[in-house]
């Protein structure tokens, strides 16, 4: 039945106000349905979460909080056609801390044929140069690894200027050492306040659990999306952060050595 005919019937039977309400409600439902279809969310029981199946390259990130990991089981896991293809591993935090499981996780991830990346948890109250050197001392990158990542999640009461200048110094120091442009991991609020108009030239990995869309981010810089922090993976204790690569597969080289 054509929409015009349907509206006419509703108006005749139920009146103009009820018809208007019906049309608005229908529009909302159609828009929501299109958004869900765009990302093709599907619940994958083995992982315990919905995955945006529009994207074909899925991965996780881990740290010491995930305790000891059985990387062979991680590599073997596959469900509903989804196989994990990459992992980011916490390497360092602040000016002196190194993740106690980083060394083993870094080696075993490579043995398991997962593309690997290392990240640094950034503290705005610590010297950014010392933080960069902490990462450099700890992480040796190889061809095919992801570029270094700075994990920016906290502001610790620091001024905007202190945060932006400190992050820039970390990024520039790490880039000078590895000869590749690092990537920024952050959430939507911090991105809009600190990154978008100040450090927008760097590749972006966004943590956004809204499950709506990614149109609020710079599509030319967005490469990774952490869409859920409550997944499960065999070989890993507890909940795991899940990510997807949101560009065409051949663009993976943009954020790898």
Image: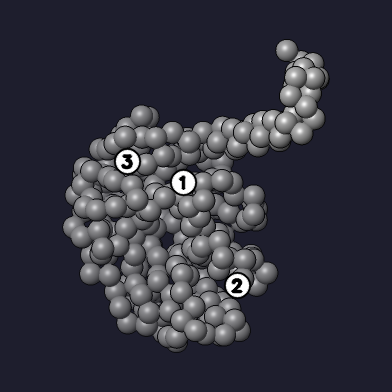
Q: What element carries label 2?
A: helix
| Residue linked to disc 1 | 244
Residue 132 image offset from top left, x and y in percent: 43, 78
Residue pictured at 31% horizontal, 35% vertical: 45
Where is residue 130? Give x, y as percent: 41, 84
Closest to the observer, 141 or 249: 249
Q: Nearer the viewer, residue 242 or 116?
A: 242
Residue at the spot 29% in from the left edge and 36% down from the top edge = 46
Identify which residue, 40 or 224, lies in the foreground: 40
N-terminal of the two: label 2 or label 3?
3
Q: How crowded is mark 2: few (under 14 residues within 10 Å), some or many (20 or more)?
A: some
Q: Residues within 10 Å of mark 1 (few under 14, many from 20)?
A: many
Residues at marks 2 and 1, CA–CA distance in whole angstroms:
23 Å
Q: Earlier in the sequence, mark 2 or mark 1?
A: 2
Residue tagged 2: 194
- Whether residue 173 appears in this view of the structure is no
**Camera-nearest residue between 44 and 92:** 44
Callout 2 touching callout 3 (CB < 8 Å): no
Secondary structure beneath label 1? strand
Q: Distance between the residues labelled 2 and 3?
A: 33 Å
Q: Name the residue under label 3.
A: 48
Place of residue 257 in the rendered image (x, y in percent of width and height, measured from the top left): 47, 57
Is 84 left or right of 129, judged from the image as shown? left
Mark 2 or 1, closer to the camera: 2
């Amino acid at each position: 039945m054509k929409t015009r005919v349907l509206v006419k019937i509703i108006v005749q039977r139920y009146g103009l106000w009820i018809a208007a309400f019906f049309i608005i409600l229908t529009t909302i439902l159609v828009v929501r349905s299109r958004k869900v279809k765009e990302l093709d969310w599907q619940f994958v029981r083995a992982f315990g979460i919905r995955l945006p199946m529009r994207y074909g390259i899925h991965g996780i990130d881990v740290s010491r909080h995930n305790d000891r990991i059985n990387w062979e089981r991680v590599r073997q896991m596959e469900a509903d056609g989804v196989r994990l293809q990459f992992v980011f591993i916490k390497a360092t935090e602040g000016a002196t801390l190194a993740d106690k499981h980083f060394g083993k996780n870094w080696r075993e991830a490579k043995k398991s044929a997962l593309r690997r990346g290392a990240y640094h948890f950034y503290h705005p109250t610590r010297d950014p140069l010392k933080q960069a050197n902490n990462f450099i001392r700890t992480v040796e990158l190889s061809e095919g690894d992801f570029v270094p990542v700075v994990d920016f999640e906290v502001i610790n009461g620091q001024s905007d200027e202190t945060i932006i200048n400190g992050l820039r110094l970390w990024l520039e120091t790490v880039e000078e050492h590895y000869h590749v442009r690092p990537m920024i991991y952050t959430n939507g609020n911090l991105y809009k306040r600190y990154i978008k108009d100040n450090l927008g030239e760097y590749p972006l990995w966004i943590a956004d659990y809204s499950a709506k869309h990614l149109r609020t981010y710079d599509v030319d810089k967005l490469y990774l999306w952490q869409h859920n922090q409550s997944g499960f993976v065999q070989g890993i204790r507890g909940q795991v952060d899940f990510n997807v690569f949101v560009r065409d597969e051949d663009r993976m080289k943009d954020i790898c050595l």
